[in-house]
Amino acid sequence: MHRYACKQQAANRKIYKRLTVSELELLRETQRMNNNEELRRQRRGFPLRGKTVMVTRARAQSAEITTQLETLGANVIHCPTIEVASPASWAPLDASIQKLAEYDWLVFTSANGVEFFSQRLRDKESGGIATLTKPIICAIGPATARALEAAGAVTTVVPSDSRAEGALAAIIDYAGGPQQIRGLSFLIPRARVARDILPDGLRKLGARVDAVETYQTIKASVEPESVLRLFKENTIDAITFTSSSTVSNFSAIVGLEDLSGLLANTIAVCIGPVTAETAESHRIEKIVHPRVYNTDALVDSIVKAIGRS
């Protein structure tokens, strides 16, 4: 045996001799607890091991959440319920781009809005979004802010609350109060189907608002039999819904308005309360959603709901 190891064992024996029986038991219990804690820490590295999560957002946009879930040990099944497409007509957005310098605010509600607006702006104007100086740019949600940063834009306002209500409050706060909104001009490039809380709220305060269709989400082409077979042959522990349209389209794909039976043993993890309300309207019973409405928080909610302790 190595001489250092012998000395270390002798030192340990001296320590144990100085301890009472109760102290020895406490020491051993502490060591046991530390070992168990280490095991728990190791297991926490894969809290979703053996769990299956269905992701319903567009495949092109599911890389981030898929990577996070698989890193945590989950088996991820892709069932894209939406596809992101160009607007039915570019005319309204083109008209807004032509008078872009007249807007005081440019408010993006999603990364999709950033992508389609930026591409159209590049098609129409050589400078692109990175060269914009006048409009104050607001990004609703961290993913939207990251998309703007990647496009080279300078984002001034990023509301902590990613709902339309939170964005309205953040804009009012930055402007210096509700009375400062009157007379301002806002451009909101957004999806064809979207909530009107933000534009209506701004208009009530006297703002001029152009909420322009910049892209649209359409129901993905998925064989309903294949989805139903997945639930019949597998245990789907959780299904993610990142927008109301993912819920509605999933319902349409499987041909069931009432999803309580199909998802009886599955937890629906929604991005936020609006999506959760849509899930409730389809009779889904097991619903959770994070307090912060982004992918990281969504994954945290999945871990809390179905993860191994």
Image (cartoon, rainbow, N blue to C red):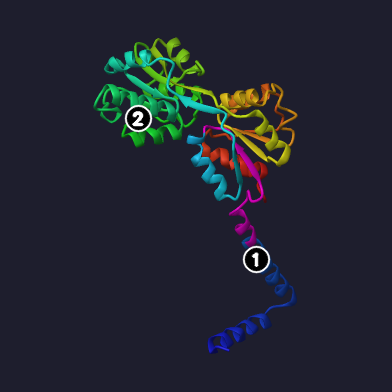
The correct choice, above or below, for 305 with respect to 95 in the image is below
Q: Quadrant of the N terminus?
A: bottom right
Question: Which label number is shown at residue 156?
Answer: 2
Q: How many marks?
A: 2
Is 129 displayed left or right of 201 in the figure? left
Q: Quadrant of residue 26?
A: bottom right
Is 304 displayed left or right of 292 in the figure? right
Per the image, the residue denoted by label 1 is 35
Under circle 1, the secondary element is: helix
Where are the magenta residues, as a range? 39-58
Name the residue at the left extreme.
126
Q: Residue drawn 65% across and 28% down? A: 224
Residue 308 visible, this angle:
yes
Q: Earlier in the sequence, mark 2 or mark 1?
A: 1
Amino acid beneath label 2: Thr
Question: Which label number is shown at residue 153?
Answer: none
